[in-house]
Image (spheres, helix red, strand yellow):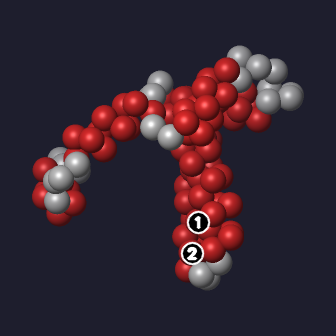
Amino acid sequence: MNDALQRLFTTIESRRNADPAVSYVAKMLGKGTAKIAKKVGEEGVEVAIAAAQADRAATVRESADLVFHLMLLWAAMGIAPTDVMAELERREGVSGIEEKKKRAW
C-alpha cells in the first residue's frame, strides 16, 4: 500500500483514544459507525458532484476527504487496509461483470 495511506491509517488508529474535544478522529469514532458511514456517503456525493462539474481541483480535494473518512470507517469496523488490499488482489484479473454475478446480494 502507498506509504501515505499507511501513515494516514496509523494516525487514525493512534488517535482512537484521544480527547474528542481536540481530535476529530476520536470525536467521529465516538459517534459510532452509522455516523461515520453517513459521512462517507456525503463525501462520495461531493466527489461525484465535483467530477460531474469537471472541477479537477475540487475532485482531488473531495477524494482526499472521501479516502480519509473511508479509512476512519475501516478503523471503526476493525478493518485493516491490508484486508481491503487482499480483496482487491483476490479480484485481480477477474472480470467485473463476472465478479458481480458471484455476489449473493
For badge 2, the amino acid type reads Ala
Circle on res. 103 = none
For mark 2, does the 10 Å Cα neighbourhood hold few (<14), some (14 to 19), or many (20 or more) residues?
some
The local crowd at label 1, few if under 14, some if 14 to 19, many if 20 or more residues have their Cα within 10 Å, is many
Question: 87 or 45, which is in the foreground?
Answer: 87
Would you name the residue on which mark 1 appears? Answer: 47
Q: Residue at x 31, y 35 (%)?
A: 86
- The residue at 13%/50% (across/down) is 102
Residue that numbered label 2 is attached to: 51
Residue 50, image x, y percentages: 62, 73
Q: How many marks?
A: 2
Quadrant hosting residue 51: bottom right
Secondary element at image label 2:
helix
Quarter of the image holding residue 81?
Answer: top left
Q: Residue furthest right?
A: 21
List x then y, in percent, for residue 73: 54, 37
Which is nearer the eye, 1 or 97? 1
User: Which residue corresponds to the image point at 68% horizontal and 69% vertical from the top-left?
Assistant: 58
Q: Is residue 16 visible?
A: no
User: Left of 79 or right of it: where is 23?
Assistant: right
Q: Amino acid at mark 1?
A: Val
Do the residues bearing badges 1 and 2 touch, measured as CB atoms within 8 Å?
yes
Tell me the residue at 20%/56% (across/down): 100
Residue 70, image x, y percentages: 54, 44
Q: CA distance from mark 1 to mark 2?
A: 6 Å
Q: Position of residue 95 (x, y in %)?
A: 17, 59
Q: Is residue 53 above or below residue 50?
A: below
Is residue 17 placed above or below 82 in the rendered structure? above
